[in-house]
Amino acid sequence: MLSELQQKNVWENWLSSEMRANYFADLANRYQSWQRALTWFTLIFSSGAALAIVTDWIPLGFEWIKAALALLTAAVSFLSLVQQNQKSATDCSDLHFRWNRLASEYEALWDDMYADDAELKLKVLAEKMAELSRSSTAFPYRERVMLKWQDYVQRHHGLSATV
């Protein structure tokens, strides 16, 4: 059986885990969008460069456009490579899954907080939360985005929003 303070801890960690799960899903979506945009820019600039080289559609005096399109293609490709958006999106998706699973485990403990092994389960969950928090530090903290998900989770659970 959990003490009153431990019960409060379970409730807060449940909500906190849900917030973080939503936050990392949001970040994964943002990284995927960035990668998609960079891919399209690479395609457009490289197609323009190829078209400019193969055809003669560029008017005299504007031959620099060929070089500019080639340089833009290289720059966008370099940016895409350096940013590693696809890897970040995959890592955020994994963190979303793991935080979501942790939230479900806290919810299950909330529903069974008077069990004899509840205190042991809380310790195990606290350890999982610490490990996930450590894994999450590789990504930026965007306060506005986190507050959005805090507001969402609090409203979902019938609490007044803090934002």
Image (tube, rainbow, N blue to C red):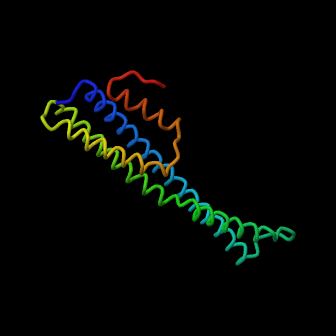
Q: Is residue 138 left or right of residue 105?
A: right
Q: Is residue 85 left or right of residue 9?
A: right
Q: Is residue 105 above or below residue 75?
A: above
Q: Is residue 69 above or below residue 4?
A: below
Q: Is residue 57 left or right of residue 120?
A: right
Residue 26 image point, x, y percent: 45, 45
Toward the top, the furthest residue is 160
Toward the right, the furthest residue is 61
- At horizontal 76% and vertical 71% (from top left) the residue drawn is 67
Q: Is residue 159 left or right of residue 162?
A: left
Residue 79 image point, x, y percent: 62, 61
Q: Nearer the viewer, residue 54 or 94?
A: 94
Residue 36 image point, x, y percent: 53, 58
Toward the bottom, the furthest residue is 54
- At horizontal 59% and vertical 63% (from top left) the residue drawn is 82
Q: Nearer the viewer, residue 81 or 8?
A: 8
Mark count:
0
To which quarter of the image does residue 75 belong?
A: bottom right
Toward the left, the furthest residue is 116
- At horizontal 67% and vertical 74% (from top left) the residue drawn is 50
Residue 39 image point, x, y percent: 56, 62
- At horizontal 21% and vertical 41% (from top left) the residue drawn is 121
On-image quarter of the N terminus: top left
